[in-house]
Amino acid sequence: KPPQKAIVKVPCPPLDPAKASEFLASAVLCTMEAILSRSDVQHSPTTLAAFFGMLEASVAQPGCSSCSEQLRSLVLARPELTGRSLALLCEVLPGCTAADASEMMMRFALRLMAAARTERHLA
């Protein structure tokens, strides 16, 4: 769970939340692109758990970390990657027997739906 912990434990302050969010978003988006480009990722429960745990932390509700609101907005600003992540989840989750990976996939989906609901209320 290192990527997930890194996102949640970023100390803002002393780090500027906007700069920390930009740095984390860049890392998350690059990781998303790398993982989603692999054809064998669905066969690695450990990778799936870490990947979806990272995504779950990156779309967390405001207050979950000191830069969560800004990070969430930056990650959700790339809907093609979010969509591809959901497509992977839909492909892998039904046959997944690894509890950690299944839990992280479901947590990501729940956080994503909560983020969508929040965005609708703000609009």
Image (tube, rainbow, N blue to C red):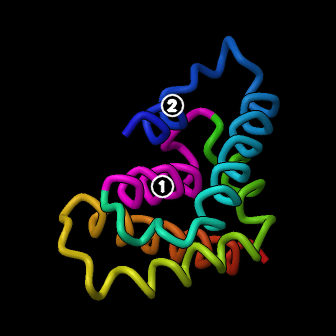
Q: Amino acid at mark 1?
A: Phe
Where is residue 108 shown, x and y percent of the image? 45, 66
Mark 2 closeness class: few <14, some 14–19, many ≥20 residues within 10 Å: few
33 or 78, which lies in front?
A: 33
Q: Report the residue marked by disc 2.
A: 6
Task: Give the secondary structure at mark 1.
Answer: helix
- The segment highlighted magenta reads 46-66
Q: Residue furthest front?
A: 40
Quarter location, residue 107: bottom left
Tell me the chief SS of the magenta region.
helix
Report the residue marked by disc 1.
51
Check the image and report above or below for 16 versus 40.
Answer: above
Quadrant containing the C terminus in the rendered view: bottom right
Q: Which mark is residue 1?
A: none
Residue 66's place in the image compared with 72, above or below, is above
Q: Earlier in the sequence, mark 1 or mark 2?
A: 2
Give residue 79's quadrant in the image.
bottom right
